Amino acid sequence: MASNLSDYKTEVHNDWCPGCGDFGIVSAIQMALAEMAIPRHKAAIFSGVGCSGKTSHYVNVYGVHTLHGRVLTFAQGAKLANPEMTIVAAGGDGDGLGIGAGHFVAAGRRNVDMTYLIFNNAVYGLTKGQASPTLKLGLKTKSLPEPNVNQSVNPIALAIASGFTFVARGYAYDVRQLKDLIIAAVKHKGLSFLDVLQPCPTYNDINTRDWFAGMDHIDEITKKPRPRIYKLEDTGYDPVVHIDSPDEENAKLTQALIKSNEWDDKIPTGIFYKNEIIAPYDERIADRIPNYLENPPAYQEISSNGKSITNISKILDSLQV
Amino acid sequence: MTSIDLTWVIGGPQGGGVESAANIFAGACAGCGLQIFGKREYYSNIKGEHSYFGVRVSDKPIRSNVTGITMLAAFDAETIFRHADDVYNDGAIVYEADLEQIKSDEVPTLDKPFKDRLEKRLSSKNKPFTIKGVLEEAKERGVILYPVSFKTILSTLADEMKNPAIRGMFRMLNVLSVSVSIGLLGLPPDTLLRSVDGVFSSKPKIAEMNKHAANYAYNFATAKYQKFKHQLSQIPKNQDTILVQGFQSTGLGKMAAGCRFQSYYPITPASDESVFLESHETFDVENNRPGSNIIVQTEDEISAIGMLIGAALTGTRAATSTSGPGFSLMAEALGWAGINEVPIVVTLYQRSGPSTGLPTRHGQDDLLSAIYAGHGDFPRIVYASGDIEEGFYDTAKCFNFAETFQMPVIHMMDKFIASTVASVKRFDPKKITIERGKLLEKISDGDYKRFTPSPDGISPRSRLGLENGIFWNTGDESDIEGHISEDPENRIYKMDKRAKKLEVALDTIPKDDQAVNHGISDFCVISWGSTKGPILDAIEMLRKDNYNVGFVQVKLLQPFPTNHVKSLLQGVKTIIDVEANHSAQLGKLLNENLDRKVDYYIVKYTGRAMTCSELYESIKKIIDGKADKRQVLSYGV
């Protein structure tokens, strides 16, 4: 049963630039939470620093606007201490793939059951348009003095190589698809990654809304624009690792990596890869600590009338001379 | 009965079992009711470099190491080259007889500066640069030599136990040299065997083999040699004593204090604590379900503190444990916890810096780093423990401070405490109180605002997951709900609110927890952290010479307890600041906060902890008016 969408909106003035792709993303997050009817106090948005960092202030659930590049660390700590929470982490491409790249890779290895959205616009917007890790080599967006001299990182491929078990791409101006992807990502058991293509109308004058729509890409026969964006699901693509076999896994990984390399003429969106055979981190903990999920750190009793109730006497006995 | 106070040192290549040997020795002595203070020294190396363990044993409470060695146990040449000169004139060296012909050139791990000093010393006494030369030098001073062919003993054992492999089990040389030592020192064999059992308790087969070897070596020594001049003896055992290492004290403190999440990145000497916690990740809880502690090894220290903050936001008591380099990486997030008033505990096991510095050696170099780390003005508490026992109880206090005042707490420990093993009074978890401050369990309506004004600056604290308790946090300045605000009036409110909590902390934390009065005298030592033990022992030595010296131990370093320290030092004529760092960092705080200056400084920055003996000499010189303003201590290899 869905909740009221307005319940998930705050009254904080949104100061993103007019036309910013971020608006679509925050709407999709609010819609997804409402559709899943997650109680507001059971959800938390963690965000990094940059324009996307403000996302947590616009959603009316617990909101933690963290440090530049560190959003995944805060989010994982909260989820591990209170596994009942639905945790969505959000940040920019510079935040997650530049300064925070080490945490991105390490998070993949853990596979904590939460969702990470990168607002990918290929520029550092809030510092006036420097090249981000996803800007293609040789491109010169309008505030760059010289064309970009670095290769771009492929977020989808990096996520797959790092061990994320749900890897997908959305587009900020296709809010409906994005909302569905967020719901699928949140419901996925394990760490899910969503690369959200998000045109920056102020600083990225190359990968614009028109560019994604193929306005420069006129079909010779129909004389209509050929959109660059297409949906994997429309092509019969099956991203799911269905059985626990190396052949199945290799096939699904390989096709996802090949798809992740598509750019320029055809840019796929949708789910690239999904693997629920790999155990999420909480299950790995529960294998060692059987009551972890029923009695997680956040809900454990630690005192009675101000006195310690943890029994350490066995350890002290072993140290007794 | 004469009193017992002797130091036994065993050395050997890293990875060669020196630590097990020392633990057997310490366990055997502690089993006889004796007090133990042991300290491990090692290189930043996995295998091969020289490591050693010094165990001081006494029938009275001891809190530090001394200068000098009563008995040295050596089965490799380097141990003899490095330590023979430290053996007292009436001390002894138990060593592998085969080593006598080895030249200093043949020991590749003897570093050049040390080798140059050694050879200079030997040539001044016309001795060859060999083990024989070093031993002759010692013998001429009166040192008794016990050459033992440990390798022959191994062969004999191999035949006796019908196990030829034993011939090559050089790790067993440790057990043999401990057992010979215990035999010479006159402790009964059963305590030795019990201790061997204890050290190898998880490996019964190895325990059996080592017990057999220990018994043989013990009997060999008692049959072959007369009793050594210095003897250990059994005294009534205090049932309340545990033999514990420093890192275990904060680990146990965290468990008892209700810490249920620790994130860390491996670093010497802090990670032993996290590994200890992980090996005790589940435990019983009185009248409750079994509890557990989630220990997460992160990709770096930035992640460690990030995860810690995330966990703390859920209302979980959470911590990390690190050393200087890791703490430097945590600086930015420390400020985030400060501006958002998140209670976190960072246990800072200091070592010698800067940079990687002396990574396995001791230092108190990070006091100012702890106080000032991070940009911007934000409140924090820096609290220092003086010894292992304080480490346990202070850990609990640090969590109380963090939750009561809603700010980061940095708990200062160091390598000296971390790698000390000592007999101390069994920790009593019942003495621990758990104060959670204004943490909310329930919120009945929807008007909650995280940073609501309060006269003490401390607002009721919600936690992630609590109904009606939604809040926002941000590294930006924020309004009372936690949303970004650059409003000047709000900025004044928030900055003043956070700063106010430091005043409240100073008013609330009991004076005895701020700074400890160990006696006041005209000459008064002031210090912080692990210098406590050497200072107390040195003061006791001085008292026997009719020198009265006071001691003020500052535990709360930030906010600085100016008024309390001032009142303690009121009648003091001469202030002596003692610290294990180069620039006398506490001295700087004192000069800044008191209306007077420190008169003398005693510092040590070799990476080796102070001994009470060198401190005794240094303080005595000051009182006798023969000291420079700054004394630099240097004992130890």
Image (cartoon, rainbow, N blue to C red):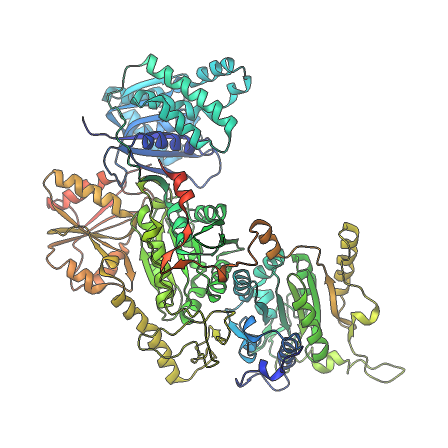
- Residue A179 in view of the camera: yes
Q: Is residue B114 left or right of residue B577?
A: right
* Foreground pick, A98 / B613: B613
What is the x, y in percent for residue B358?
39, 46
Give the answer, above or below, for where B286 lies relative to B483.
Answer: above
Residue at horizontal 76 percent and vertical 50 percent from the top: A246
Give the answer, above or below, for where B240 lies relative to B452.
Answer: above
Q: Residue furthest front?
A: B287
Q: Residue furthest right?
A: A221
Give the answer, above or below, for where B79 lies relative to A155.
Answer: above
Residue at horizontal 35 percent and vertical 68 percent from the top: B379
* Foreground pick, B365 / B169: B169
What is the x, y in percent for residue B229?
24, 21
Q: Is residue B58 left or right of residue A320?
A: left
The quadrant in which the N terminus of chain A is found is bottom right
What is the x, y in percent for residue B503?
27, 70
* Foreground pick, A311 / B136: A311
- Residue A126 in view of the camera: no
Q: Quadrant of residue B324?
A: bottom left
Number of labels in the image equals: 0
* Foreground pick, B384 / A60: A60
The quadrant in which the C terminus of chain A is found is top left
Q: Is residue B482 left or right of residue B603?
A: right
Q: Quadrant of residue B435?
A: bottom left
Q: Quadrant of residue B39?
A: top left
What is the x, y in percent for residue B26?
35, 32
Q: Is residue A58 left or right of residue A314?
A: right
Give the answer, above or below, for where B82 lies relative to B458.
Answer: above
